[in-house]
Image: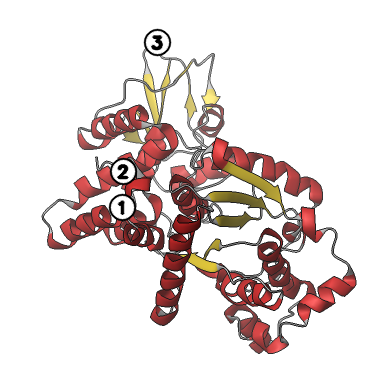
């Protein structure tokens, strides 16, 4: 296991810049160099004046559960916390009511205030798996956006042109197809830009889908209102377990941060080798030198990809569940997948009488619905005592002996 840095404050300014810029992507090398230089200058000024930088990232709590892809920006926030700066976890209580169009090619559904508040509560608690609870400032952008008058919004809008919005890729595609672009969708960038103004932000963090909102709108509005434009820290998007498409629960390629350690470890081990470098840079606590060394070992074959992936899986499980859980998850993986043995600690379910396979899968918590169970059986993903089950109508009953029901590679239940 690669050991994460113990004392980030011991890093030089150049080392801090390299660490913070690790995993960033602007789609333009000149812009990346500009943001790198501005970040370096802000860090120098903070050291000279003793004033911590003001850092924030906004989160629209559209769904209650987070996956690993959601936490990439939180990892950057934590790096700034570890370096002694002020970090704000901003809940988009007002922007959520509009719906962010940044990574969508169609209008995004609007949440109700009740949905936003309920999701926000779970978001923050899950975020503390990465962020330091005692050092995190939690705010809602309704604090300042709710007080804006129509005239205020008009004056904010005077700093932008319709052409600027139509240059955005997702808007351009919809415009060319003759698909609707609703006026309120353009408000989102203005509202997010005002978030930076209201907090007098030094650095805002976001994914590549937020490039326009942060780099163009936020900086421009700050300048227009007499503030020094923020540094835009734009991080790459983490692909899902398929290694290709953006991680998404709806696509089934996600790694939930509330997943059990063994399940999380196994999901990381399922990512393709070519996706590992992005995971090294985005999802770990490793310093640039550690990442570079690991990437080199992968490229030149001096270490087996499986061993590097196991180090990656251990690191990710350790972040969310601790070192002991990571060790146990690795042992579980070795036992189940490398040695092809059954785990000792699988849950047990007592059979009181005959029960259909689909009902049993759902009762045992191995699937969330009958349709999921049916699909897994049809795909050969269900085994009973090591043998693939193909009969959806199969009934199981107590036999006087233990039986083992398995779904996929990581889910087991002992039937007694």
Mark 1 vs mark 3, CA separation in Å:
55 Å
Q: Quadrant of residue 56?
A: bottom right
Residue under numbered circle 2: 4
Q: Is residue 388 left or right of 273 when viewed as pictured?
A: right
Mark 2 vs mark 1, CA separation in Å:
7 Å
Q: Are marks 1 and 3 in contact (CB under 8 Å)?
A: no
Given residues 130 and 38, the one toward you in this image is: 38
Given residues 206 and 350, the one toward you in this image is: 206
**3 or 2: mark nearer the eye:** 2
Instruction: Give the SS element for disc 2.
Output: loop
Residue under numbered circle 3: 400
Q: Is residue 408 visible?
A: no
Q: Is residue 49 visible?
A: yes
Given residues 359 and 175, the one toward you in this image is: 175
Q: Are marks 2 and 1 in contact (CB under 8 Å)?
A: yes
Q: Is residue 235 left or right of 169 when viewed as pictured?
A: left
Residue under numbered circle 1: 287
């Amino acid at each position: 296991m690669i050991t994460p840095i113990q004392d980030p404050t011991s890093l030089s300014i150049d080392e801090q810049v390299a660490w913070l810029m690790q995993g960033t992507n602007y789609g333009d090398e000149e812009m990346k160099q500009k943001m790198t230089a501005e970040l370096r200058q802000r860090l120098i000024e903070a050291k000279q004046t003793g004033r911590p930088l003001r850092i924030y990232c906004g989160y629209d709590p559209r769904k209650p559960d987070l996956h690993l892809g959601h936490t990439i920006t939180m990892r950057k926030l934590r790096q700034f916390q570890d370096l002694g700066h002020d970090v704000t976890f901003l809940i988009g209580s007002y922007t959520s009511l509009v719906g962010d169009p940044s990574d969508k090619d169609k209008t995004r559904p609007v949440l109700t205030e009740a949905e936003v508040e309920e999701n926000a509560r779970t978001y923050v608690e899950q975020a503390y798996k990465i962020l330091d609870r005692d050092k995190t400032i939690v705010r809602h952008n309704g604090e300042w956006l709710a007080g804006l008058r129509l005239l205020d919004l008009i004056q904010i809008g005077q700093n932008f042109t319709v052409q600027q919005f139509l240059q955005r890729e997702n808007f351009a595609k919809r415009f060319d197809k003759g698909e609707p672009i609703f006026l309120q969708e353009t408000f989102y960038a203005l509202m997010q830009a005002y978030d930076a103004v209201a907090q007098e932000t030094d650095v805002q963090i976001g994914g590549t889908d937020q490039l326009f909102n942060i780099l163009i709108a936020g900086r421009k509005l700050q300048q227009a209102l007499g503030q020094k434009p923020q540094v835009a820290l734009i991080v790459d998007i983490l692909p899902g377990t398929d290694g290709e498409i953006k991680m998404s629960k709806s696509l089934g390629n996600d790694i939930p941060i509330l997943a059990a350690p063994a399940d999380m470890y196994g999901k990381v081990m399922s990512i393709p080798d070519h996706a590992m470098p992005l995971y090294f840079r985005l999802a770990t606590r490793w310093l640039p030198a550690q990442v570079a060394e690991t990437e080199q070992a992968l490229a030149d074959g001096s270490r087996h990809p499986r061993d590097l992936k196991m180090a990656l899986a251990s690191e990710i499980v350790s972040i969310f569940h601790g070192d002991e859980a990571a060790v146990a998850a690795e042992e579980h993986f070795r036992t189940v997948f490398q040695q092809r043995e059954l785990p000792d600690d699988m849950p047990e379910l007592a059979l009181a009488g005959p029960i259909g396979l689909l009902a049993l899968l759902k009762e045992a918590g191995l699937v969330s619905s009958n349709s999921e169970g049916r699909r897994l059986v049809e795909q050969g993903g269900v085994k009973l005592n090591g043998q693939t089950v193909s009969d959806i109508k199969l009934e199981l009953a107590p036999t006087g002996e233990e039986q083992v029901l398995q779904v996929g590679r990581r889910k087991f239940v002992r039937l007694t």
